[in-house]
Amino acid sequence: MQQNDELSPGYDYEPPGVDRRALPNSLQLHNGEQYTVHGLFGSGGFGDVYRVRDGNGRQYAAKMFSRRTYNYSSDRERQAFQRIAQNPHINLLLLHLAGQLINPPPGYADEILITEACGPSIKDIMMRAREDTGHVKSPTFSMDHIKQICRQIGEALFHLEKLKIYHLDIKSANVTFMSTVKYDVDTNLSQPIITMRIPYNEKSDVWSMGCLMGDMCIGKPIFISKIGITETQKQQSQFEFMVSRMNATIPSEMITKSRQGRRCKLNLSFLENRKENNQDSLMNLLREDTDLPMFEFLKFMLIFDPTERPSFEEVIKHKFLTNF
């Protein structure tokens, strides 16, 4: 989605509880450039992304890396951005500058990646819509807009697939619009609907995109860990629930590979005598009968065996994303 330079991308969607006093006033780079900090786009496992402006008032997003994750994250992201710059795509952010800070804030590495400014994320929109309406149920997206948005996501990920770049962290908080987004919420329905005026290998991203679509449709993750105290217990519960929700048969080859080198800590014995549980069925999440084509599309994408899962080329050519 193209950015409108007259808008301030995402400035109305700053994460709650941000202490602006804790943010640096400016970022000075060794190449002589300086950026003033105007806020925070968001925080993640690898660091923070600031809203910044250059000396001419142009808006950008500046990603700062925590020292504890610096070696893992920054090198891979920089290389990915460089490959995208050589083969750009309208639905992918472009790198403006990769540089070094003169005086990085405490706890951060000196490397910085500056990209085009971002608008709100899908998660931002859903959270703000719920706050605006005060509705008990989380607002979800209209089916037409799920198709439009996910068509663009699919095209972007297909482009990355061709470049041999794998995102591996597709979720509502990591998919952003390129400019400030206006939306309406129809609260006359039992489930409030958002309508928008929109100005490890690649197969892992296909699965993640399917999960994101489900989140947009029902307002919460379609796979949730139900029980467990330890991380392993939670993973066990979530995996069993995923298998039940999709009524899936796990190929014996996948089970054998998972046990090699003791990499998988899950107890897979439940697969031997598993019975179908209609209560957990994916189809029970339909808001209404007209949602059926999308849920059939989810079944097409959410295949446990990566070798049988569709590619993004197949995803974006599917009738669900081509029939508007």
Image: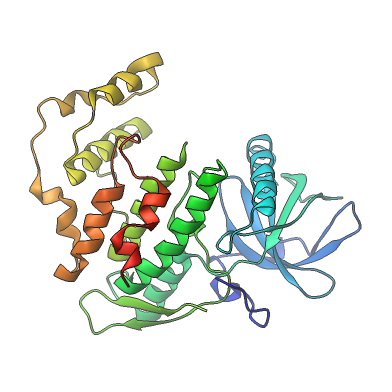
Q: Position of residue 177 (x, y in %)?
A: 53, 68
Can residue 223 be seen? no
Q: Is residue 129 above or below residue 219?
A: below
Q: Position of residue 163 (x, y in %)?
A: 57, 44
Q: Is residue 10 left or right of residue 189?
A: right
The quarter in which the C terminus is drawn is bottom left
**Residue shown at the point (23%, 23%) measured from the top left:** 252
Q: Nearer the viewer, residue 302 or 212?
A: 302
Residue closer to the observer: 158 or 141:
158
Rendering quarter of residue 7: bottom right
Q: Quick check: can you spot residue 253?
A: yes
* Total labels drawn: 0
Q: Position of residue 212 (x, y in %)?
A: 37, 56
Q: Residue furthest top?
A: 261
Q: How is the image coloured?
A: rainbow
Q: Position of residue 61 (x, y in %)?
A: 68, 62
In this picture, residue 301 sits left or right of residue 23: left
Instruction: Using the image as rendered, state which of residue 175 and residue 145 is in the foreground.
Output: 145
> Is 189 situated left or right of 214 in this image?
left
- Residue 277's place in the image compared with 40, above or below, is above
Q: Residue furthest right?
A: 32
**What residue is at 60 percent from the left and 66 percent from the top?**
118
Could you tell whether 223 is left or right of 106 in the image? Answer: left
User: Is residue 60 or residue 166 the one in the foreground?
Assistant: 166
Q: Residue at x 52, y 79 (%)?
A: 199
Q: Residue at x 65, y 37 (%)?
A: 68
- Where 317 falls versus 9 (above or below)? above
Report the quarter where the N terminus lies.
bottom right
Check the image and report above or below for 149 versus 256.
Answer: below
